[in-house]
Image (cartoon, rainbow, N blue to C red):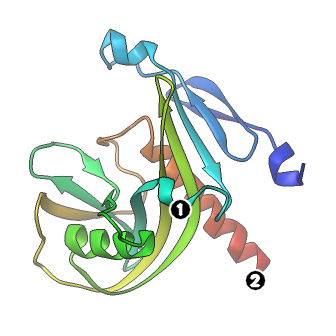
Amino acid sequence: MNSITMRRLTLTFWGICKSYGGYGEILLYGHPHWGAERYMNKIKVQFYEDNTIDDNKLEFAVILAKYQNEWIYCKHKERDTWEIPGGHREKNEEILNTAKRELKEETGAQNFTIIPIAIYSVTVSNKTNYGKLFYSEVKEMSQNLEYEIEKIQLFDDIPDKLTYPEIQPYLYKYIVSKINRNRKEL
């Protein structure tokens, strides 16, 4: 076991303590505003080092992106909440290309850098899905949004009303901790 595997932290989320162990393992026990069935299901978010999960298992890409030093969040046309840009991988598509395509479609990003950060999984009711987490710095944006996104908004921090409140805060915290760690190493 390496030092990353052995690291254990305690996080507080909505006032409920969870264990953050192994390499980025987080157990979530639901939120009181969710329905009883959803509240009873444990949601497990786990982070993995790059290339430790078979690429064929990666179903989606999620991109935490900054523009003018603020975080970009999207509002779907059918929801009243904010979400991190991202989406599902198309058949035979490279996961990096999924991330680039989704960032362009959902934010109007035209000129940007994008780097892979980690693989992550979300497990609900013993079903696990894998995705890849990316970080992007957007230099230029178009006003044209494609498909299902109604609008984007820039935030200093993570917004309150999230589409996936049981997952997105952990992706955000993971990215921020990676960025802060990398700055200290420079």
Q: Which mark is residue 152?
A: none
Please give the residue where the numbered disc 1 appears in the rendered image.
Answer: 55
- Would residue 60 appear left or right of 83 to someone viewing this image? right
Asked if 54 appears above or below 144 in the picture, the reply is: above
Residue 25 appearing in the image = yes
In front of the other: 117 or 11: 117
Vertical side of 177 occupied by 24: above or below: above
Tell me what residue is drawn at x 38 percent, y 70 percent.
99
Q: Earlier in the sequence, mark 1 or mark 2?
A: 1
Give the percent coordinates (x, y) of residue 48.
65, 53
Total numbered badges shown on the rendered structure? 2
Q: Which image quarter is the C terminus in?
A: bottom right
Q: Residue at x 22, y 67 (%)?
A: 106
What residue is disc 2 on? 186
Instruction: Please give left or right for residue 118 compared with residue 143 in the image.
Output: right
Q: Position of residue 183 (x, y in %)?
A: 69, 76
| Residue 156: % across, % down | 40, 62
Quarter of the view holding residue 50: bottom right
SS for dot 2:
loop
Looking at the rendered structure, the secondary structure element under dot 1 is helix
Left or right? Give the position of 173 relative to 6.
left
Q: Position of residue 72 (x, y in %)?
A: 33, 66
Circle 1 packing at 10 Å, graded few (<14), some (14-19), many (20+), is some
Amino acid under disc 2: Leu
Amino acid type, mark 1: Asp
Question: Residue shown at 53%/45% (left/top)?
Answer: 121
Residue 32 can be seen, yes or no:
no
Badge nearest the viewer, 1 or 2: 1
Q: Quadrant of residue 104?
A: bottom left
Q: Residue at x 10, y 77 (%)?
A: 144
> Is residue 30 toward the left or the right of residue 36 in the image?
right
* Cβ atoms under marks 1 and 2 closer than 8 Å: no
